[in-house]
Amino acid sequence: MLALQRAAGNRAVVGCVAASRQRPTLARETWWRGAGQGIAPSSPGGALHDFGDGLYLTKDQAVARQYAALRGGEKATPQLFRLDLERGGLGRVLDLTKDARWAEFMRRPAFPGGPTHRSLIEMVNENYSRFFRAFLEEQKLSLAEFDAVIGPEYVRGGTQVCVRNPVLQAQIRGSMVQVPLASEAAAAAGSAAEVATTAEAVAGRGRALAVTGRVAAVAIEALIFAVIVLALEYLRVRAEQEKFREKMRAAQPQIEAALVGQNDQIRALQSTSAGRTVWAQITIWIDSQGASTSTMAGIPFYDHSFVDAGFATANVGLNFGATRTSKPGKSSTWPHQYGATTYTPRRDLVTYSVPVPYDPAALPDLMSRNERIRHIERDAATPGLPEGVVQVLFEEREAFLKFGPQVYGPPAPPRVHGPPAPARLDSPSAPKK
């Protein structure tokens, strides 16, 4: 520096010092993580992950919401976190999204005449880890050389990162900001506008539709959410999810017509159930076909493709239901030059429940309306409900609060109207022991 001062003067020294203090501003990227409240991370080696043990994030908010629902399950509250991370903040990164070697490896058949590595991952995601290790070995790469791995999420879509460095993991966990799941457009898969609607969109659509149309519309979104969260193997590919959504939305008029036929039963239940929620239980069918191939090379692979879907039945009752049953069809085996493939058709029946709103004017007194509000709030707190279902309940609560003066204090003793209705123990409306 002294030599620079002698050669070029003080102005050059000042410019050099100023330039050295300027830190270049790097672009920031937004990452997301879906989690379950109180669910501890898996122990090292305790679960099969795409890139091994680490903290996983995704660039796709809809995918993070899907993971939040999966990790929360029935026993924990789903959580969504956001992280704005400066590029370069992940340390030493192996970025498969920009690696030509990985792209070529994914296009390559797993065995002569067989499907590509990528196809096998899309069929069964557990193949990802095995193929990733094979890629590292082929390229003579050591995973210990990298703090993080970035790669495609072939099943649910988007880009994922696995942060392997424990110090970086701690820093990232401390920087993540929780995002309220009920405040933004939700998606279990695909785009947020496709899978779950925002509170504003739900409210706007609810004002425009009759009660049966409103319930049918929410049922469609709830079923899409429920089925994709089930992670049925034939809906892991985004294109298959799109076909399923189209079939479900095409079935909405049938669901509306079926609910209209249940109006008398709905009114009877609402007038005799002491404010308990009446649930429309919608059942759909989904046809698919599995293909299991055994090869001479000893590498088995499995494919399961979506075929068709439609509306089955609609019933009403006082119990919330979310069930799935499967019935396989008759298998057939076809030999070929690489081995043999067995095809097995299957039909899944999936049932999901949607609340049918009360008319506040139909309840005779203030106590009855207050009891209804208490049931709404208790049912809306049920873990795992899609946002559209929760929004329907709170729209109904808002209608009751606007209807007239409320006296809303401690819960009143239960009122008995004849013999108690049967309730499942897992029902949000089931009486507590």
Image: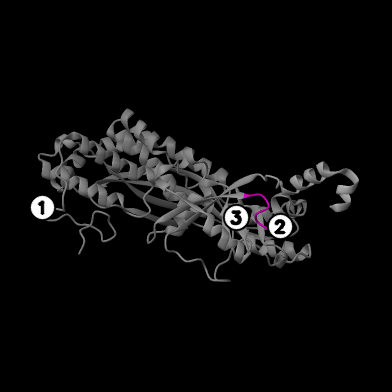
Of 138 and 391, which appears nearest the observer?
391
Disc 3 to disc 1, C-alpha distance: 53 Å
Along the line of sight, which residue is nearer the eye, 151 or 18? Answer: 18
Circle 3 residues within 10 Å: few <14, some 14–19, many ≥20:
many
SS for tag 2?
strand
Asked if residue 161 is positioned above or below residue 40 in the image, the reply reads: above
Residue at the image position 25 percent from the left and 59 percent from the top: 424
The residue carrying pointer 1 sits among few (fewer than 14), some (14 to 19) or many (20 or more) residues within 10 Å by Cα, namely few
The quadrant in which residue 184 appears is top left
Single out the mark in the foreground, 2 or 1.
Answer: 2
Q: Is residue 425 visible?
A: yes
User: Which residue is label 3 attached to?
Assistant: 123
Residue 94 badge: 2
Q: Amino acid at mark 3?
A: Met
Quarter occupied by residue 216: top left
Across and down, in percent, residue 239 comes to: 57, 43
Q: Which residues are magenta?
A: 86-94
Q: Residue furthest right?
A: 7
Q: Earlier in the sequence, mark 3 or mark 1?
A: 3
Q: Nearer the viewer, mark 2 or mark 3?
A: 2
The numbered mark at residue 433 is none
Between the C-alphas of marks 2 and 1, the distance is: 64 Å
The quadrant of the rendering that contains the C terminus is bottom left
